[in-house]
Image: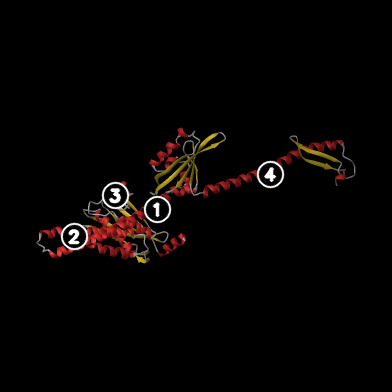
Amino acid sequence: VRRALHYYVPCVVRGRMVAVIGLGRSADGALLSSEDVEILRTVSGYVAVAIENSLLYQEQQERASELKLLKEFNESIIESINVGLVAVDLQGKVTRLNSALEYILNIKRDEAIGQHVQDLFSEDFAETLWQVLGVERWRQTEIRNIYKIHTATCAGRTLVLNIAIAPLQDSQGQTGALVVVEDVTSRIRLEEQLQQREKLSSIGLLAAGVAHEVNTPLTGVSSYTQMLLGMLPDTDPKHALLQKVRRQAERATNIVNNLLNFSRSGSATEFAEVDIRRVLDDTLQLLEPQMRGSRIEIVRAYDPDSSKVFGNSGKLQQIFTNLLLNARDSIPDGGRITISTAATAGDALLIEVADDGVGIAPENVAKIYDPFYTTKGVGRGTGLGLAVSYGIVQEHSGHISVDSTPGCGTTFRITLPTANGRTRLQAVGD
């Protein structure tokens, strides 16, 4: 075929040859005239431009396709990452955010776009954030961090957040900032629970040793006191003194028993399906003599459809005994104690014990599960009730929390797994 071609005309554009037009003789075998060759050279320029445009278009299409894939890939990363991301401009207005931030702060993307970043957070935290993010600091190029900041969502949920702020820049300079929001609420709670468990474990070992050492001489004191009381007539002046000794010995015995219960809270326990309403009613019946005359109204608000948990009825009764006695002591002038149950998501049951008593001071809330910590007067508490209760709840793979407002009352919330929930937790642990 090459031998049949007599004319080769390059297609050149911008000094670059992009193709060659090859022609042979005419249909009647004649060679092309000089006019034909000139026309061919002119046409070759247009062909070169057309070919170049086609190549450029193809290149642009490929580049656009690559950019689209890159954009989709970046979008997928931004939307899949489990930390919140929010981009703000130089005025602090939200220009973009991801779905994780929507979930963390319980906000809607369409409503958040265009808002000032301060409007996404609680007032105190927003002020702290803006001090770091403020206009006078836009020129900073380093990443800035704010750790363990407490804030509240519009739904009233309290969160602990770690914040990182990085500058957003283009070829012409800084255009805004990227705020990375990590919700560490669950992690902080787990760390606190782990610290509490370690504390309870070490103190439990000490408590067991002390209790056993004290129990032997205490038994002797109680026995000899009873013998002396039996030997003396009621009219003897020493009888009243011995009665005081007996009462103090009984109190010491109760303290020793609490210490032993505290030290055994992590020991093996038999579990079975338990009707929590029956446990609560039995506890109230047991405490009726101590509640009598206290002018306290007991309100039961049980969920009629959900009452079964997987646990040990004796230890569960110990939890509710401690909570109810604490509630009673917080209402010295009478009031109301409300006990309620409700099913929750995840095969669990929520039990609440709420009172309208004096409440707990904010600075004391973090200490209430510490062994031997008590705000009651001398002789009225050992400070082990809530520590023991905390250990029992952990043993049941449950969770205990408290909300309290001084002067308004206290609510303890205990979440316990059902039989299905316990099986699921064990499967996850395995």
Badge 4 marks a residue whose secondary structure is: helix
Q: State how far apart marks 4 and 3 are (Cα).
A: 72 Å
Left or right of 176, for residue 204: left
Residue density around tag 3, few if under 14, some if 14–19, many if 20 or more, within 10 Å: many
Q: Residue at x 85, y 36 (%)?
A: 35
The answer to whether residue 201 is seen in the rendering is: yes
Q: Residue at x 41, y 51 (%)?
A: 191
Badge 1 marks a residue whose secondary structure is: helix
Q: State how far apart marks 3 and 2 are (Cα).
A: 33 Å
Residue density around tag 2, few if under 14, some if 14–19, many if 20 or more, within 10 Å: some
Badge 3 marks a residue whose secondary structure is: loop
Residue 214, compared with residue 365, is above or below; it is: below
Residue 241: image x %, image y %? 14, 57
Res 43 → quadrant: top right
The answer to whether residue 353 is seen in the rendering is: no
Q: Residue at x 33, y 62 (%)?
A: 316
| Camera-side mark, 4 or 2 | 2
Res 310 → quadrant: bottom left
- Residue position marked by numbered label 4 in the rendering: 58
- Residue position marked by numbered label 2 in the rendering: 246
Query: Between 218 and 184, which is closer to the camera in this rendering?
Result: 218
Mark 2 vs 1, N-terminal side: 1
Residue 106: image x %, image y %? 43, 49
Mark 4 vs 3, N-terminal side: 4
| Camera-side mark, 2 or 1 | 2
Q: Residue at x 24, y 60 (%)?
A: 217
